[in-house]
Amino acid sequence: MIPTKHQTLKISSNTQSLRLVERLIEDVCQVYGVNEDCYGNMLIAVTEAVNNAIQHGNQNNLDKAVRIGFESDDNKLTFSITDEGPGFDFSNLPDPTDPANLDKVSGRGVFLMTQLSDGIKFEESGKRVLLSFNG
């Protein structure tokens, strides 16, 4: 699949579907000449967002879908990840770098997405996340 300036991929809420997301990111990076560092950041951040949508948003419910949108605008590549869950309070997340949270096995996804992308924005009460990367 060759990505166009705007594209949407719909996957089932199954972690096996992450392969399709990885393929989309590979294709985008190849078409837009994304460097290796940005590719790695994009791969981790977007797959983390999709994984969160599958597990936390859709609760692994195979009857619910995750939509991954891609858009190219000037030198910016933006991915939108939307689930069918109830959303979450993205403004009140525990700090994973707080010593009290260092031993916890989860809770680092949004932190990783924030650190690895050039921009992150939550919409629709947290059911949709936009990740942008300066190509």
Image (cartoon, rainbow, N blue to C red):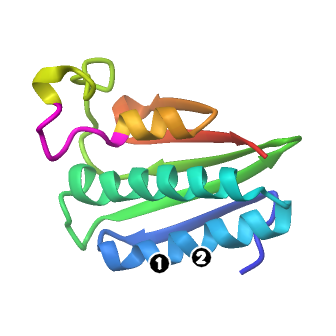
Residue type beneath disc 1: Arg
Q: Is residue 70 left or right of residue 53?
A: right
Span colored in magenta: 102-109
Q: From this viewpoint, which residue is outermost toward the right?
A: 74
Q: Where residue 40 sits in the image (x, y, percent)? A: 59, 57
> In terms of secondary structure, where does tag 1 sit?
helix
Q: Quadrant of the N terminus?
A: bottom right
Q: Which residue is drawn at the image coordinates 24% and 41% (left, top)?
A: 86
Q: Which residue is mark 1?
A: 19
Is residue 59 shown left or right of residue 116?
A: left
Residue at mark 1 to residue at mark 2: CA–CA distance:
6 Å
Q: Majority secondary structure of the magenta segment?
A: loop
Name the residue rendered at 29%, 39% in the picture.
Answer: 108
The part of the image, by quadrant, that contains residue 98 is top left
Q: Position of residue 26 (x, y in %)?
A: 66, 71
In the rendered view, would you say 76 is above or below 32? above
Badge 2: how crowded within 10 Å, few (<14), some, or many (20+)? few
Q: Are marks 1 and 2 in contact (CB under 8 Å)?
A: yes
Residue type at mark 2 is: Arg
In the rendered structure, find residue 31 and report the number of the disc placed on it: none
Relative side of 25 to 82, left or right: right
Identify whether 114 is placed above or below 16: above
Left or right position of 86 against 105: right
Q: Nearer the viewer, residue 8 or 25?
A: 25
Taking the magenta stretch, the answer to whether it contains residue 68 is no
Q: Position of residue 97 (x, y in %)?
A: 27, 25
Is 6 located above or below residue 26 in the figure?
Answer: above
Residue at the image point whose x is 50% and y is 33% from the top: 115
**Which residue carries the number 2 mark?**
23
Magenta segment: does it hold 104?
yes
Q: Nearer the viewer, residue 98 or 83?
A: 98
Looking at the rendering, which quadrant does residue 15 occupy? bottom left
